[in-house]
Image (spheres, rainbow, N blue to C red):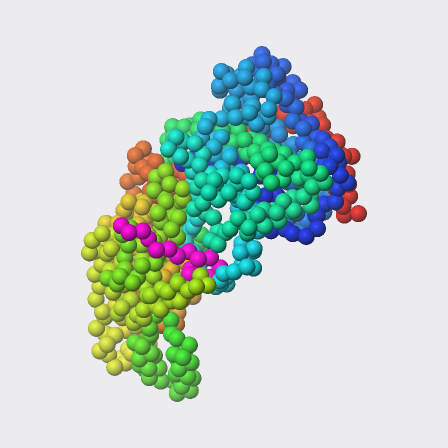
C-alpha cells in the first residue's frame, strides 16, 4: 500500500468545522459580490520554463487559476481559525492561507502538465473542455473519480451527522459519558476505499431528507446512518448545516438563485468537488513520481546500506550508554526500531539476585485490582506494618485479600459510554464465548467483519476481536444496556487467559503451573535473612505460550506469536485496570536494571523476560494481581539475524517490510518535499502569480 507523502491542502472548505460551529459569522463580509472577488491569479505557463520545446505545447493546457475570496473564507473556517485561537494575528493567518492557496494552485497546474505528458491521448479533449471538473476527470481513472466523489459525499454526510446527533439526543435516547481506551485503527478506513456496486460504480449518496436525498437512496451510507434517524431529524440537521454555511456567505441565502434543498446543485458543492479532484490530480502525480523513487530504493543495496548505517550508529551509542537504550525502548514503534541491544551480564540486578534472567524486553500487564473495600483493609494493614515492622504479618494478610479478589469484564463503557461499540455477530460468525451461549456480544463490528483484503476498514493492531463480553447483556428500552458480568478469581482469570489464547492460535499452546512456594511457606516474603525479602515468594503462577519466536515477524499477522500477542492484548482491554498500557504498541518496556515499578512486579516481569517471549507470570502486589505476558525480548548484540530483504520487504508486518516503509516514510518524504520546493521555486514567481491584496485587506485588518 502506498503512503501518501504530499497531497493537496485540505480545501474541503469548512465541511468538518461547520458541523461544530454555531452562532454568528466568524468573518463579516459586505455582500455576495465581495465574496466573488478574485484575490489571486496563478498561471505557471507564464514562466520562462515553458519556453522550452518540451513544455511549449502545454501552454494551451494551463489555464489561469483564479482564487476567489470565498475560497479564502472557507479555508479560514476549516483550518485558519485554529491559528487565531493559538495566538496568531488575523493578518498573519490570512497571509499564510493566501500563500497556501497559491502554492496549491501551482502544484495542481504542474501536476496537470505532468499527467498530460504521461497520457497525451487526452490532450486535445482536455484543451477543448470548458467545464473545470470534466477537464480534471479526463486525467483520472474511474476509481480515482469515484474516490474523489466518495470523499466529498462522506464529508458532507459526516458534517450533517454531527448536527443530527444533537437533534436525536435532544428528542430521545440514552447518552453515556464513560470512556475506555479503544484499539489502534478503530474505524479507520483503507486509504483508497470507496463503496461500489457489482459494476464498479460508486454506491454512496448524500442523505439530507429533502427530495431524492433520502436514506433509501443513499446506498452504502445506510450502514453508517445514525440510529434513530428519521426524515424529520435529518432535514432539521441539514438546515442547521446550511445555516452555518449561509452565515458565512458560502451559500446564497439572500435570494433563490440556488435551490438549497438540492445539495448537488449548490455552487459551493461543485467547487468542493473540483477541490477533491485537484487533490486526486496532485496525489496521482506524486504516486507516479514516488513509484519511480521507490524503485530506486530497491536497487543498489540501498536498504541494506541504510540498515547498516543505523546499526553502526546504535551499536556505538547503546554500548556506551544504557540510558540511551532505555530511552529508545520507550519510543519503540513500527517506525522506530532497535537494531542493537547492549550486554547485561554485569547488571546490578544479577549481582543482587545472583540469577541470569536480567534482559531487556516488553510486557503486557493485566492488573486485577483490589476492590474499594479491600483497599481500605490493605491501608489498615500497612499502618500496622509501619507501626510494628512485622512484614510477614502484612504479607500473609495481604495474601488473604488477594485470594478474595474478584474481577470482571471492564468494557461496560463500550456499551453505555459515549459510543456504543457493541454488536451481536450474525449466525455463522465464529467467536469465543467460554462455552456460555449467553455470551453473545462483541465489539467494533466494522473493523472485525470488513477488514479482509478489499474491505473498507483497516485491521485493529494486535487485537484479535473475538473475545465476547464475559457476562449477560440486557438491552433496555432507552437503548442503554444492563450488564451482569461474571466474576473471576485469579484461577478463573488464568483459565480465561489459557482458553482464549489457545482459541486464537488454534491449538493448545498454553501451559502453566502454580508456584508451590506461594502456598507453602509460612513467611510470605521474608527469607531466612530477616533483612531481605524473597520476591520469588510473590509469584503465584508461571507459564509459557509455545511457539517458534522470530523477532523479524513480531507484527506479522500470519504467525502464532502475533496471534498470541493479539489475544493477550485483547484480554488487557477486557480486564486490566492499568489503562496506561492500552494501545501502547507492544506494552511496557522492562530494563535490565532498576526500574520505578513496585518490587514484586519488577521481579516477576524481569524473570519472565529472562525466560523469553511468550512467557507469563502472575504475581502479587499492593495494587492486586498482575498477569504479566512477555511480548518481546532483546538478546545482546545485533537484534535481527538472517534478514531477507528480497523476499520479505513486501510481506506485511515483517521487520524488513516495516523498515522499508520507514525508509519510504522518511526518504521519500524528503525527496517529495524537495521536489515540491523545487516546483514552487520554479513556478511561484511574480511572473506567474498576481495577488490583489486590496481585495482581502479587510480580512487582514480584523485585528484593528
Left/right of residue 672 with respect to residue 456 in the rendered view: right
Provide residue 458's location: percent of width, then percent of height: 40, 44
Provide residue 270's location: percent of width, then percent of height: 59, 33
- Residue nearer the viewer, 221 or 545: 221
Left/right of residue 475 with respect to residue 492 in the rendered view: right
| Residue range of the region highlighted in magenta in the rendering | 412-428
Residue 656 visible in image: no
| Quarter the N terminus occupies | top left
- Main SS class of the magenta portion in the image: loop
Residue sitting at x 78%, y 34%: 694
- Residue nearer the viewer, 254 or 440: 254
Q: Is residue 628 above or below residue 243?
A: below
Magenta span contains residue 35: no
Provide residue 646's location: percent of width, then percent of height: 31, 33
Residue 32 visible in image: yes
Residue sitting at x 22%, y 69%: 514
Amino acid at each position: 500500500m502506498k503512503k501518501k507523502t504530499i497531497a493537496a491542502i485540505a480545501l474541503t472548505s469548512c465541511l468538518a468545522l461547520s458541523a461544530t460551529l454555531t452562532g454568528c459569522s466568524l468573518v463579516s463580509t459586505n455582500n455576495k459580490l465581495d465574496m466573488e472577488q478574485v484575490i489571486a491569479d496563478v498561471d505557471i505557463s507564464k514562466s520562462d520554463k515553458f519556453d522550452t520545446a518540451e513544455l511549449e505545447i502545454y501552454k494551451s493546457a494551463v489555464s489561469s487559476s483564479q482564487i476567489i475570496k470565498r475560497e479564502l473564507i472557507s479555508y479560514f473556517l476549516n483550518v485558519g481559525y485554529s491559528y487565531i485561537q493559538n495566538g496568531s494575528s488575523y493578518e498573519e493567518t490570512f497571509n499564510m492561507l493566501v500563500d497556501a492557496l497559491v502554492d496549491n494552485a501551482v502544484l495542481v497546474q504542474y501536476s496537470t502538465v505532468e499527467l498530460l505528458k504521461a497520457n497525451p491521448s487526452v490532450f486535445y479533449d482536455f484543451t477543448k473542455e470548458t467545464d473545470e471538473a470534466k477537464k480534471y476527470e479526463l486525467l483520472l481513472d474511474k476509481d480515482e473519480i469515484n474516490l474523489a466523489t466518495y470523499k466529498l459525499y462522506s464529508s458532507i454526510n459526516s458534517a450533517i451527522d454531527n448536527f443530527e446527533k444533537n437533534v436525536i439526543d435532544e428528542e430521545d435516547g440514552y447518552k453515556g459519558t464513560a470512556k475506555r481506551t479503544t484499539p489502534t485503527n478503530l474505524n479507520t478506513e483503507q486509504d483508497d476505499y470507496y463503496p461500489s456496486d457489482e459494476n464498479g460504480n460508486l454506491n454512496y449518496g448524500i442523505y439530507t431528507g429533502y427530495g431524492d436525498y433520502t436514506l433509501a437512496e443513499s446506498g452504502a451510507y445506510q450502514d453508517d446512518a445514525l440510529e434513530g434517524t428519521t426524515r424529520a431529524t435529518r432535514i432539521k440537521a441539514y438546515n442547521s448545516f446550511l445555516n452555518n454555511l449561509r452565515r458565512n456567505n458560502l451559500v446564497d441565502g439572500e435570494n433563490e438563485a440556488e435551490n438549497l434543498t438540492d445539495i448537488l446543485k449548490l455552487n459551493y458543492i461543485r467547487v468542493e468537488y473540483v477541490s477533491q479532484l485537484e487533490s486526486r490530480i496532485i496525489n496521482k502525480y506524486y504516486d507516479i513520481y514516488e513509484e519511480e523513487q521507490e524503485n530506486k530504493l530497491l536497487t543498489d543495496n540501498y536498504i541494506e546500506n541504510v540498515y547498516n548505517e543505523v546499526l553502526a550508529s546504535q551499536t556505538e551509542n547503546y554500548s556506551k550508554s544504557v540510558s540511551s537504550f532505555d530511552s529508545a525502548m520507550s519510543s519503540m514503534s513500527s517506525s522506530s526500531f532497535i537494531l542493537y541491544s547492549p550486554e547485561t551480564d554485569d547488571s546490578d540486578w544479577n549481582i543482587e539476585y545472583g540469577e541470569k534472567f536480567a534482559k531487556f524486553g516488553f510486557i503486557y500487564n493485566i492488573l486485577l485490582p483490589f476492590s474499594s473495600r479491600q483497599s481500605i483493609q490493605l491501608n489498615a494493614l500497612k499502618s500496622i506494618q509501619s507501626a510494628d515492622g512485622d512484614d510477614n504479618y502484612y504479607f500473609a494478610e495481604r495474601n488473604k485479600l488477594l485470594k478474595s479478589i474478584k474481577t470482571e469484564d471492564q468494557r461496560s463503557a463500550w456499551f453505555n459510554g459515549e459510543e456504543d461499540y457493541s454488536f451481536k455477530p450474525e449466525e455463522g460468525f465464529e467467536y469465543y464465548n467460554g462455552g456460555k451461549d449467553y455470551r453473545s456480544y462483541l465489539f467494533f463490528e466494522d473493523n472485525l467483519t470488513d477488514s479482509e483484503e478489499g474491505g473498507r476498514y483497516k485491521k485493529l493492531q494486535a487485537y484479535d476481536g473475538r473475545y465476547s463480553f464475559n457476562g449477560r447483556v440486557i438491552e433496555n428500552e432507552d437503548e442503554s444496556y444492563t450488564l451482569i458480568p461474571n466474576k473471576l478469581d485469579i484461577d478463573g482469570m488464568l483459565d480465561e487467559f489459557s482458553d482464549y489464547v489457545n482459541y486464537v492460535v488454534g491449538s493448545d499452546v498454553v501451559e502453566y503451573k502454580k508456584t508451590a512456594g506461594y502456598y507453602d511457606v509460612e513467611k510470605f516474603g521474608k527469607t531466612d535473612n530477616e533483612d531481605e525479602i524473597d520476591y520469588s515468594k510473590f509469584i503465584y503462577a508461571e507459564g509459557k505460550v509455545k511457539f517458534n519466536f522470530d523477532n523479524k515477524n513480531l507484527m506479522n499477522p500470519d504467525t502464532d506469536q502475533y496471534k498470541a500477542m493479539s489475544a493477550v492484548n485483547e484480554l488487557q482491554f477486557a480486564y486490566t485496570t492499568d489503562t496506561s498500557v492500552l494501545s501502547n504498541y507492544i506494552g511496557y518496556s522492562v530494563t535490565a536494571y532498576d526500574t520505578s515499578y513496585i518490587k514484586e512486579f519488577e521481579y516477576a516481569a524481569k524473570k519472565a523476560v529472562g525466560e523469553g517471549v511468550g512467557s507469563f507470570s502472575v504475581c502479587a502486589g499492593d495494587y492486586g494481581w498482575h498477569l504479566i505476558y512477555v511480548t518481546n525480548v532483546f538478546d545482546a548484540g545485533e537484534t535481527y539475524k538472517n534478514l531477507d530483504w528480497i523476499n520479505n520487504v513486501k510481506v506485511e508486518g515483517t521487520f524488513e517490510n516495516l523498515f522499508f516503509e520507514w525508509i519510504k516514510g522518511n526518504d521519500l518524504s524528503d525527496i517529495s518535499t524537495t521536489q515540491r520546493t523545487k516546483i514552487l521555486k520554479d513556478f511561484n514567481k511574480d511572473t506567474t502569480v498576481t495577488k490583489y491584496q486590496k481585495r482581502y485587506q479587510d480580512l487582514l485588518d480584523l485585528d484593528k
